[in-house]
Image (tube, rainbow, N blue to C red):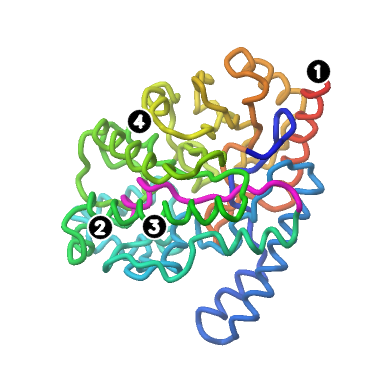
Amino acid sequence: MSTLPLFPVTTVGSWPRPRALLAADRSRRSGESPPAAWEAALDRAVLEVVQAQHRAGVDLVTDGEQSRDNFYSFVADKLDGVRLMSLAEMLEYVDDKEAFARLLDTLDVPAYSIRNPTCVGRLKPREPLTTDDVTRLRRFTDKPIKATLPGPYILTRAMWVPEVAREAYPSKEALGDDVVAILREEVARLVAAGVAFIQFDEPVLTELVFSQGQTRTFMCASLAARDDPADELRWAVEMLGRVVADAGDTRTGVHVCRGNWSRDERTLLRGGYAPLAPWFAQMPVTQLVLEYATPRAGAVIAPGDKELGLGVVNPRSDDVEDPAQIVARARETLRLVPAEKLFLNPDCGFGTFAARPINEAAVAERKLTVMAEAARRLRAG
Protein backbone atom coordinates (compact mmCIF):
# COMPACT_ATOMS: atom_id res chain seq x y z
CA MET A 1 0.00 0.00 0.00
CA SER A 2 1.11 3.56 -0.65
CA THR A 3 2.44 5.67 2.19
CA LEU A 4 -0.08 8.19 3.46
CA PRO A 5 0.00 10.58 6.44
CA LEU A 6 -2.04 9.90 9.53
CA PHE A 7 -5.73 10.74 9.10
CA PRO A 8 -5.64 10.86 5.28
CA VAL A 9 -8.22 13.14 3.69
CA THR A 10 -10.05 11.95 0.59
CA THR A 11 -13.40 12.10 -1.17
CA VAL A 12 -15.96 9.40 -1.75
CA GLY A 13 -15.93 10.00 -5.48
CA SER A 14 -18.33 12.24 -7.38
CA TRP A 15 -17.88 15.99 -7.90
CA PRO A 16 -20.25 18.49 -9.58
CA ARG A 17 -19.75 18.57 -13.35
CA PRO A 18 -19.28 21.98 -14.99
CA ARG A 19 -21.92 23.12 -17.49
CA ALA A 20 -19.38 23.09 -20.30
CA LEU A 21 -18.76 19.38 -19.72
CA LEU A 22 -22.47 18.56 -19.70
CA ALA A 23 -22.90 20.50 -22.95
CA ALA A 24 -19.95 18.66 -24.51
CA ASP A 25 -21.48 15.34 -23.47
CA ARG A 26 -24.81 16.21 -25.08
CA SER A 27 -23.05 17.26 -28.28
CA ARG A 28 -21.00 14.08 -28.31
CA ARG A 29 -24.02 11.82 -27.86
CA SER A 30 -26.03 13.64 -30.53
CA GLY A 31 -23.15 13.48 -32.99
CA GLU A 32 -22.93 17.28 -33.24
CA SER A 33 -19.26 17.37 -32.18
CA PRO A 34 -16.27 15.04 -32.65
CA PRO A 35 -14.98 12.84 -29.81
CA ALA A 36 -11.93 15.09 -29.49
CA ALA A 37 -14.11 17.96 -28.28
CA TRP A 38 -15.50 15.76 -25.51
CA GLU A 39 -12.02 14.61 -24.51
CA ALA A 40 -10.78 18.20 -24.31
CA ALA A 41 -13.74 19.24 -22.16
CA LEU A 42 -13.22 16.20 -19.94
CA ASP A 43 -9.54 17.04 -19.49
CA ARG A 44 -10.42 20.56 -18.39
CA ALA A 45 -13.07 19.32 -15.95
CA VAL A 46 -10.79 16.72 -14.36
CA LEU A 47 -8.00 19.28 -14.05
CA GLU A 48 -10.38 21.63 -12.21
CA VAL A 49 -11.37 18.85 -9.82
CA VAL A 50 -7.74 17.95 -9.15
CA GLN A 51 -6.76 21.57 -8.58
CA ALA A 52 -9.62 21.98 -6.09
CA GLN A 53 -8.44 18.91 -4.18
CA HIS A 54 -4.82 20.13 -4.23
CA ARG A 55 -5.85 23.56 -2.93
CA ALA A 56 -7.93 21.99 -0.18
CA GLY A 57 -5.14 19.67 0.96
CA VAL A 58 -6.59 16.29 -0.02
CA ASP A 59 -4.15 13.40 0.38
CA LEU A 60 -5.81 10.80 -1.84
CA VAL A 61 -7.36 12.22 -5.00
CA THR A 62 -10.13 11.12 -7.38
CA ASP A 63 -11.15 12.40 -10.81
CA GLY A 64 -14.56 13.41 -9.47
CA GLU A 65 -16.20 10.81 -11.72
CA GLN A 66 -16.42 13.55 -14.34
CA SER A 67 -16.92 11.17 -17.25
CA ARG A 68 -19.95 9.47 -15.65
CA ASP A 69 -23.68 10.05 -15.79
CA ASN A 70 -23.80 8.69 -12.25
CA PHE A 71 -21.77 6.35 -10.10
CA TYR A 72 -23.06 3.15 -11.71
CA SER A 73 -25.02 4.03 -14.86
CA PHE A 74 -21.83 4.89 -16.76
CA VAL A 75 -21.23 1.19 -17.41
CA ALA A 76 -23.73 1.46 -20.26
CA ASP A 77 -21.03 3.37 -22.15
CA LYS A 78 -18.49 0.63 -21.49
CA LEU A 79 -20.38 -2.64 -21.89
CA ASP A 80 -22.35 -4.24 -24.67
CA GLY A 81 -25.65 -5.67 -23.46
CA VAL A 82 -26.56 -2.64 -21.31
CA ARG A 83 -29.01 0.15 -22.11
CA LEU A 84 -29.79 3.23 -20.06
CA MET A 85 -33.45 3.54 -19.12
CA SER A 86 -34.99 6.46 -17.27
CA LEU A 87 -37.01 5.66 -14.19
CA ALA A 88 -40.02 6.84 -16.16
CA GLU A 89 -39.31 4.09 -18.70
CA MET A 90 -38.93 1.61 -15.84
CA LEU A 91 -42.58 2.21 -14.99
CA GLU A 92 -43.46 0.01 -17.93
CA TYR A 93 -42.14 -2.99 -16.00
CA VAL A 94 -43.80 -2.27 -12.65
CA ASP A 95 -47.00 -4.13 -11.77
CA ASP A 96 -48.33 -1.31 -9.59
CA LYS A 97 -47.41 1.70 -11.70
CA GLU A 98 -49.41 4.17 -9.63
CA ALA A 99 -47.73 3.14 -6.38
CA PHE A 100 -44.25 3.32 -7.92
CA ALA A 101 -44.98 6.78 -9.32
CA ARG A 102 -46.13 7.95 -5.86
CA LEU A 103 -42.94 6.50 -4.36
CA LEU A 104 -40.75 8.48 -6.75
CA ASP A 105 -42.68 11.65 -5.99
CA THR A 106 -42.53 11.14 -2.22
CA LEU A 107 -38.79 10.43 -2.29
CA ASP A 108 -38.05 13.51 -4.44
CA VAL A 109 -36.79 11.40 -7.33
CA PRO A 110 -36.65 13.06 -10.79
CA ALA A 111 -37.94 10.12 -12.84
CA TYR A 112 -36.92 11.57 -16.20
CA SER A 113 -33.40 12.78 -15.35
CA ILE A 114 -32.05 9.72 -13.52
CA ARG A 115 -31.18 6.76 -15.71
CA ASN A 116 -30.62 3.12 -14.81
CA PRO A 117 -28.27 0.71 -16.62
CA THR A 118 -30.49 -2.18 -17.66
CA CYS A 119 -29.31 -5.52 -18.99
CA VAL A 120 -30.72 -6.13 -22.47
CA GLY A 121 -28.22 -8.73 -23.70
CA ARG A 122 -25.09 -10.69 -22.79
CA LEU A 123 -22.53 -8.44 -21.14
CA LYS A 124 -19.32 -7.88 -23.07
CA PRO A 125 -16.72 -5.19 -22.27
CA ARG A 126 -16.04 -2.66 -25.01
CA GLU A 127 -13.44 -0.79 -22.97
CA PRO A 128 -12.15 -0.63 -19.37
CA LEU A 129 -14.62 0.72 -16.84
CA THR A 130 -12.36 3.25 -15.15
CA THR A 131 -8.70 2.52 -15.94
CA ASP A 132 -8.70 5.11 -18.74
CA ASP A 133 -9.99 7.68 -16.24
CA VAL A 134 -7.09 6.83 -13.94
CA THR A 135 -4.65 7.33 -16.80
CA ARG A 136 -6.11 10.77 -17.44
CA LEU A 137 -6.06 11.65 -13.74
CA ARG A 138 -2.40 10.69 -13.43
CA ARG A 139 -1.51 13.41 -15.95
CA PHE A 140 -2.72 16.03 -13.48
CA THR A 141 -1.46 14.80 -10.10
CA ASP A 142 1.46 13.12 -8.37
CA LYS A 143 -0.64 12.30 -5.33
CA PRO A 144 -1.94 8.79 -4.58
CA ILE A 145 -5.10 7.99 -6.52
CA LYS A 146 -8.41 6.49 -5.44
CA ALA A 147 -10.41 4.73 -8.16
CA THR A 148 -14.14 4.22 -7.62
CA LEU A 149 -16.32 1.45 -9.02
CA PRO A 150 -19.89 0.30 -8.46
CA GLY A 151 -19.94 -2.81 -6.31
CA PRO A 152 -21.00 -6.11 -7.84
CA TYR A 153 -24.24 -6.29 -5.86
CA ILE A 154 -25.66 -2.88 -6.77
CA LEU A 155 -24.53 -3.28 -10.36
CA THR A 156 -26.19 -6.68 -10.73
CA ARG A 157 -29.35 -5.63 -8.95
CA ALA A 158 -29.63 -2.45 -10.99
CA MET A 159 -29.23 -4.26 -14.29
CA TRP A 160 -31.55 -7.16 -13.40
CA VAL A 161 -34.97 -6.19 -14.69
CA PRO A 162 -36.43 -9.68 -15.19
CA GLU A 163 -38.83 -8.83 -18.02
CA VAL A 164 -35.87 -7.60 -20.09
CA ALA A 165 -32.77 -9.38 -18.76
CA ARG A 166 -34.16 -12.92 -18.88
CA GLU A 167 -33.72 -12.94 -22.64
CA ALA A 168 -29.96 -13.02 -21.99
CA TYR A 169 -29.62 -14.56 -18.50
CA PRO A 170 -31.75 -17.20 -16.77
CA SER A 171 -31.31 -15.58 -13.34
CA LYS A 172 -29.79 -12.57 -11.61
CA GLU A 173 -27.14 -14.92 -10.18
CA ALA A 174 -26.03 -15.81 -13.70
CA LEU A 175 -25.90 -12.11 -14.55
CA GLY A 176 -23.93 -11.55 -11.34
CA ASP A 177 -21.28 -14.05 -12.42
CA ASP A 178 -20.53 -11.99 -15.51
CA VAL A 179 -20.55 -8.76 -13.48
CA VAL A 180 -18.02 -10.27 -11.07
CA ALA A 181 -15.76 -11.36 -13.93
CA ILE A 182 -15.83 -7.89 -15.49
CA LEU A 183 -15.09 -6.12 -12.19
CA ARG A 184 -12.34 -8.60 -11.34
CA GLU A 185 -10.60 -7.86 -14.64
CA GLU A 186 -10.94 -4.15 -13.94
CA VAL A 187 -9.35 -4.59 -10.51
CA ALA A 188 -6.38 -6.30 -12.14
CA ARG A 189 -5.94 -3.36 -14.51
CA LEU A 190 -6.19 -0.83 -11.70
CA VAL A 191 -3.63 -2.70 -9.61
CA ALA A 192 -1.29 -2.73 -12.62
CA ALA A 193 -1.89 1.01 -13.04
CA GLY A 194 -0.66 1.59 -9.49
CA VAL A 195 -3.76 3.07 -7.89
CA ALA A 196 -3.54 3.44 -4.11
CA PHE A 197 -7.16 2.64 -3.29
CA ILE A 198 -10.00 0.87 -5.11
CA GLN A 199 -13.38 1.74 -3.63
CA PHE A 200 -16.60 -0.16 -4.38
CA ASP A 201 -19.91 1.63 -3.90
CA GLU A 202 -22.67 -0.51 -2.34
CA PRO A 203 -25.12 2.04 -0.86
CA VAL A 204 -28.12 -0.20 -1.35
CA LEU A 205 -26.97 -2.59 1.41
CA THR A 206 -28.54 -0.26 3.97
CA GLU A 207 -31.83 -0.43 2.12
CA LEU A 208 -31.83 -4.21 2.59
CA VAL A 209 -31.70 -4.00 6.37
CA PHE A 210 -33.75 -0.86 6.93
CA SER A 211 -36.65 -1.66 4.61
CA GLN A 212 -36.89 -5.32 5.65
CA GLY A 213 -37.10 -6.41 2.04
CA GLN A 214 -39.88 -4.00 1.02
CA THR A 215 -39.44 -1.58 -1.88
CA ARG A 216 -38.39 1.69 -0.24
CA THR A 217 -35.88 3.42 -2.46
CA PHE A 218 -34.90 3.57 -6.09
CA MET A 219 -31.17 3.43 -5.21
CA CYS A 220 -31.02 0.76 -7.83
CA ALA A 221 -34.04 0.01 -9.91
CA SER A 222 -34.49 -3.68 -9.27
CA LEU A 223 -38.19 -4.22 -9.81
CA ALA A 224 -38.27 -7.96 -9.11
CA ALA A 225 -39.49 -9.24 -5.75
CA ARG A 226 -36.50 -9.60 -3.46
CA ASP A 227 -35.29 -12.57 -1.50
CA ASP A 228 -34.74 -12.59 2.24
CA PRO A 229 -32.31 -9.73 3.11
CA ALA A 230 -29.88 -12.18 4.73
CA ASP A 231 -29.66 -14.12 1.48
CA GLU A 232 -29.07 -10.93 -0.48
CA LEU A 233 -26.37 -9.77 1.95
CA ARG A 234 -24.67 -13.17 1.88
CA TRP A 235 -24.63 -13.00 -1.90
CA ALA A 236 -23.29 -9.43 -1.88
CA VAL A 237 -20.41 -10.42 0.40
CA GLU A 238 -19.60 -13.48 -1.69
CA MET A 239 -19.53 -11.52 -4.95
CA LEU A 240 -17.31 -8.79 -3.50
CA GLY A 241 -14.90 -11.45 -2.25
CA ARG A 242 -14.52 -12.82 -5.75
CA VAL A 243 -14.02 -9.37 -7.23
CA VAL A 244 -11.12 -8.41 -4.91
CA ALA A 245 -9.50 -11.85 -4.76
CA ASP A 246 -6.49 -10.71 -6.82
CA ALA A 247 -6.11 -7.18 -5.44
CA GLY A 248 -2.99 -8.16 -3.48
CA ASP A 249 -1.64 -5.35 -1.31
CA THR A 250 -3.68 -2.64 -2.99
CA ARG A 251 -6.03 -0.96 -0.51
CA THR A 252 -9.68 -1.83 -1.19
CA GLY A 253 -12.81 -0.48 0.43
CA VAL A 254 -16.57 -0.55 0.32
CA HIS A 255 -18.70 2.58 0.64
CA VAL A 256 -22.16 2.23 2.17
CA CYS A 257 -24.50 5.17 2.79
CA ARG A 258 -28.27 5.75 2.92
CA GLY A 259 -28.86 7.36 -0.44
CA ASN A 260 -27.58 10.61 -1.90
CA TRP A 261 -30.17 11.66 -4.45
CA SER A 262 -31.88 14.53 -2.60
CA ARG A 263 -31.02 17.37 -0.25
CA ASP A 264 -34.23 16.67 1.64
CA GLU A 265 -32.96 14.48 4.46
CA ARG A 266 -36.49 13.30 5.21
CA THR A 267 -36.55 11.29 1.98
CA LEU A 268 -33.34 9.37 2.76
CA LEU A 269 -32.91 6.17 4.72
CA ARG A 270 -32.40 6.28 8.47
CA GLY A 271 -30.71 3.82 10.84
CA GLY A 272 -27.35 2.78 12.28
CA TYR A 273 -24.88 0.36 10.73
CA ALA A 274 -25.17 -2.22 13.52
CA PRO A 275 -27.37 -4.63 11.48
CA LEU A 276 -24.68 -4.66 8.79
CA ALA A 277 -21.73 -5.14 11.15
CA PRO A 278 -21.65 -8.97 10.87
CA TRP A 279 -21.64 -8.69 7.08
CA PHE A 280 -18.97 -5.98 7.10
CA ALA A 281 -16.79 -8.34 9.14
CA GLN A 282 -16.96 -10.92 6.35
CA MET A 283 -16.01 -8.52 3.56
CA PRO A 284 -12.38 -9.08 2.47
CA VAL A 285 -11.64 -5.37 2.04
CA THR A 286 -9.20 -3.05 3.77
CA GLN A 287 -11.59 -0.23 4.63
CA LEU A 288 -15.22 0.59 5.37
CA VAL A 289 -16.15 4.02 3.99
CA LEU A 290 -19.20 5.07 6.01
CA GLU A 291 -21.32 8.18 6.47
CA TYR A 292 -21.45 9.65 9.96
CA ALA A 293 -21.92 13.40 9.49
CA THR A 294 -25.68 12.92 9.43
CA PRO A 295 -27.52 11.96 12.61
CA ARG A 296 -29.45 9.46 10.48
CA ALA A 297 -26.36 7.24 10.57
CA GLY A 298 -26.41 6.66 14.33
CA ALA A 299 -23.37 5.91 16.49
CA VAL A 300 -20.01 4.90 15.04
CA ILE A 301 -19.51 1.13 15.02
CA ALA A 302 -16.16 -0.54 15.57
CA PRO A 303 -14.83 -1.69 12.16
CA GLY A 304 -13.00 -4.69 13.61
CA ASP A 305 -9.65 -5.18 11.96
CA LYS A 306 -10.51 -2.85 9.07
CA GLU A 307 -9.73 0.79 8.46
CA LEU A 308 -12.57 3.28 8.78
CA GLY A 309 -13.28 6.04 6.30
CA LEU A 310 -15.17 8.33 8.68
CA GLY A 311 -17.78 10.59 7.09
CA VAL A 312 -17.28 13.99 8.72
CA VAL A 313 -19.01 16.49 6.38
CA ASN A 314 -22.47 16.42 4.84
CA PRO A 315 -22.26 16.77 1.03
CA ARG A 316 -25.93 17.81 0.82
CA SER A 317 -25.59 20.91 3.01
CA ASP A 318 -24.36 24.42 2.22
CA ASP A 319 -23.20 24.85 5.81
CA VAL A 320 -19.44 24.33 6.08
CA GLU A 321 -18.52 22.29 9.14
CA ASP A 322 -16.23 23.56 11.91
CA PRO A 323 -12.78 21.90 11.93
CA ALA A 324 -12.95 21.72 15.73
CA GLN A 325 -16.11 19.62 15.53
CA ILE A 326 -14.46 17.28 13.03
CA VAL A 327 -11.46 16.94 15.33
CA ALA A 328 -13.72 16.14 18.27
CA ARG A 329 -15.61 13.51 16.29
CA ALA A 330 -12.38 11.91 15.12
CA ARG A 331 -10.97 11.81 18.64
CA GLU A 332 -14.12 10.08 19.87
CA THR A 333 -13.72 7.54 17.08
CA LEU A 334 -10.11 6.85 18.09
CA ARG A 335 -11.55 4.87 20.99
CA LEU A 336 -12.69 2.35 18.39
CA VAL A 337 -10.10 2.71 15.63
CA PRO A 338 -6.29 3.06 15.80
CA ALA A 339 -5.01 6.37 14.44
CA GLU A 340 -3.22 4.63 11.59
CA LYS A 341 -6.54 3.17 10.42
CA LEU A 342 -8.69 6.31 10.47
CA PHE A 343 -9.38 8.23 7.25
CA LEU A 344 -11.51 11.38 6.87
CA ASN A 345 -14.00 11.74 4.03
CA PRO A 346 -17.36 13.30 3.20
CA ASP A 347 -20.44 11.19 3.84
CA CYS A 348 -20.90 10.65 0.11
CA GLY A 349 -20.22 12.30 -3.24
CA PHE A 350 -20.94 15.93 -4.07
CA GLY A 351 -22.34 15.30 -7.54
CA THR A 352 -24.09 11.94 -7.57
CA PHE A 353 -26.03 12.57 -10.79
CA ALA A 354 -24.42 14.57 -13.59
CA ALA A 355 -27.55 16.59 -14.35
CA ARG A 356 -28.59 16.98 -10.71
CA PRO A 357 -25.56 17.57 -8.45
CA ILE A 358 -25.99 17.49 -4.70
CA ASN A 359 -23.88 20.60 -4.15
CA GLU A 360 -21.76 23.25 -5.85
CA ALA A 361 -18.05 22.86 -6.48
CA ALA A 362 -17.15 25.93 -4.40
CA VAL A 363 -18.99 24.58 -1.35
CA ALA A 364 -17.46 21.15 -1.85
CA GLU A 365 -13.96 22.62 -1.90
CA ARG A 366 -14.59 24.55 1.32
CA LYS A 367 -15.76 21.36 3.00
CA LEU A 368 -12.62 19.52 1.90
CA THR A 369 -10.51 22.43 3.17
CA VAL A 370 -11.94 22.17 6.69
CA MET A 371 -11.42 18.41 6.61
CA ALA A 372 -7.75 18.95 5.75
CA GLU A 373 -7.42 21.52 8.55
CA ALA A 374 -8.94 19.03 10.99
CA ALA A 375 -6.45 16.40 9.85
CA ARG A 376 -3.55 18.79 10.46
CA ARG A 377 -4.80 19.47 14.00
CA LEU A 378 -5.17 15.74 14.65
CA ARG A 379 -1.65 15.04 13.43
CA ALA A 380 -0.27 17.83 15.59
CA GLY A 381 -2.06 16.40 18.59
The label nearer to you, 3 versus 1, is 3
Nearer the camera: disc 4 or disc 2: 2
Query: Between marks 2 and 3, how big is the CA–CA gap?
Result: 19 Å
Magenta span = 142-158
Residue 256, horizontal then vertical, whole percent: 47, 37
Given the image, on which type of amino acid does mark 3 rest?
Ile
Residue reaching furthest top? 335
**Residue designated by label 3:** 182
Residue 363 to residue 354: above or below = above
| Residue type beneath disc 1 | Gly
Tell me if mark 1 has few (under 14), some (14-19) or many (20+) residues whose alpha carbon lies within 10 angstroms of its own: few
In the rendered view, tell whether residue 313 sits above or below residue 327.
below
Instruction: Choose the circle earlier in sequence order: 4 or 3.
Output: 3
Corner quadrant of residue 291: top right
Q: 348 or 58, which is in the foreground?
A: 58
Q: Dot 3: within a 10 Å radius of its alpha carbon, few (fewer than 14), some, or many (20 or more) residues?
A: some
Q: CA distance from mark 4 to mark 2?
A: 22 Å
Q: Which residue is tagged 2?
A: 161
Secondary element at image label 2: loop
Is residue 141 left or right of 16 when viewed as pictured? right
The mark found on residue 299 in the picture is none
Q: Label 1: which residue?
A: 381
Amino acid bearing label 2: Val
